[in-house]
Amino acid sequence: MLLYQMHELGRAWMAPMTYWAEAGAKMFAAPGSWLSAVPGASRLAAGYELLYRVGKDYEKPEFGIHSIQIDGNAYPVIEREMQRKPFCRLLRFKRYADDADNIAELKDDPPVLVVAPLSGHHSTLLRDTVKTLLRDHKVYITDWVDARMVPAEDGAFTLDDYVAYIQDFIRLIGAETLHVISVCQPTVPVLAAVSLMAARGEATPRSLVMMGGPIDTRESPTQVNDLAVHKPLWWFEGNLIHHVPANFPGRGRRVYPGFLQHGGFVAMNPERHFQSHWDFYQDLVKGDLEDADSHRRFYDEYNAVLDMPAEYYLDTIRVVFQEHLLPRGLWDVAGERVNPGAIKNTALLTIEGELDDISGQGQTRAAHTLCTGVAEADREHLTILGAGHYGIFSGRRWREQVYPQVRKFIAKYAA
């Protein structure tokens, strides 16, 4: 199928138009430009910018976390790459202090591994999660690589490989003191990774915090779950899997393209996105630059998507959404049976949003039913009232309602 190639040709054809639209927006909006005084200039500038943002390419955003405020003091933050694998980088956000007392305090903070989802968006979607955690923790995060940028000779990437990556990262950081936070999709492979480590007698993290994930999608199925169930696996492979075009390093690799995923995201709430863009246009016309900038920041992140490896995507559809192998106790990873009941020395906190339309209520909480080896006293669950999917890990509800509970839970089990 040539859909990916046709998409790239279309982007190339639109490129001159987007450059022209960007230039037009600046010419009619710049204070020093005589065109800004033309009658209707604000509407022309707004229209040009809207056209530019609809047509432009959205590159992977930067985390952009250079400092944080703790108790009124500013601490510099450096982003470091701790390990690089073909499909993922392990990043550390390291804080620095300039006096002995503060240095000792930062060294005593518990390490946290944030496992970002590999489900369309870049790990920068968790920027707010990371920045908030940095106040009280040493923070690591999985930064998944766009599959179209991975040469085909680096081989395939499966759901089993994902589990192996998580195990390697846990060992590298040190399971004995580590706390793992998984957001959405990775709750399943993270639970598998820790289950397998426990069954082998390896050290496991001190706690697991699982947020809005599809542990058991038979609970409160959502629109996302229904699509996966009502279409056979061959339909996904035949209609959604394409080869990376020749203009990328991963040429020839089979992927689920980011532009198709993005189309699916938008199709879930088309009216809301249309209204958001109309409001953006109106804000530009009125000169409400703060709201317009908020729109830019959101869609710079939302529209930046990556390609997923085909093998991993199809594995996830089959294992998680169609056959429910984890909650049924039938999932084998690299020949080993996944048994969450083997986990004994790791505390468990699950978090769900009351209004989550991606992972319905009960899907994440199902982890408690599976982790029979974890003592009742070491298990907790939170349902955040009024929160949707993104609200449990980003924004005001995350910072004011969720994070204080997460911080308290981690502190309880810190070494």
Image (spheres, rainbow, N blue to C red):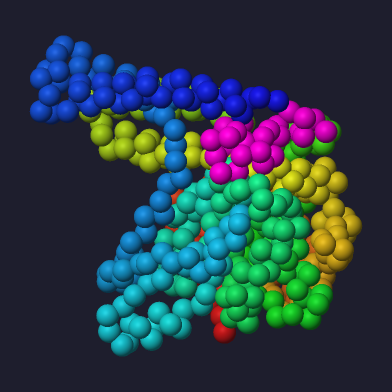
Report whether 394 appears left or right of 198.
Answer: left
Q: Where's residue 97, x and y in %?
A: 31, 78
Q: What residue sits 15% from the left and 20% below the top?
A: 36
Quadrant of the frame with the N terminus: top right
Q: What residue sits 26% from the left and 24% below the top?
A: 23
Q: What residue sits 41% from the left and 54% below the top?
A: 63
Q: Where's residue 397, x and y in %?
A: 48, 52
Q: Where's residue 386, x and y in %?
A: 54, 45
Name the residue nearer the viewer: 397 or 59.
59
Quadrant of the frame with the C terminus: bottom right
Q: What residue sits 32% from the left and 21% below the top?
A: 21
Report whether 365 appears left or right of 98.
Answer: right
Report whether 394 appears left or right of 295.
Answer: right
Q: Is residue 213 visible?
A: no
259 inside magenta stretch: yes
Q: In which quarter of the image is residue 65?
A: bottom left
Q: Quadrant of residue 351?
A: bottom right
129 inside magenta stretch: no
Which span is picked out in magenta? 234-262
Above-or-below relation of 338 to 232: below
Q: Where's residue 199, x and y in %?
A: 82, 75
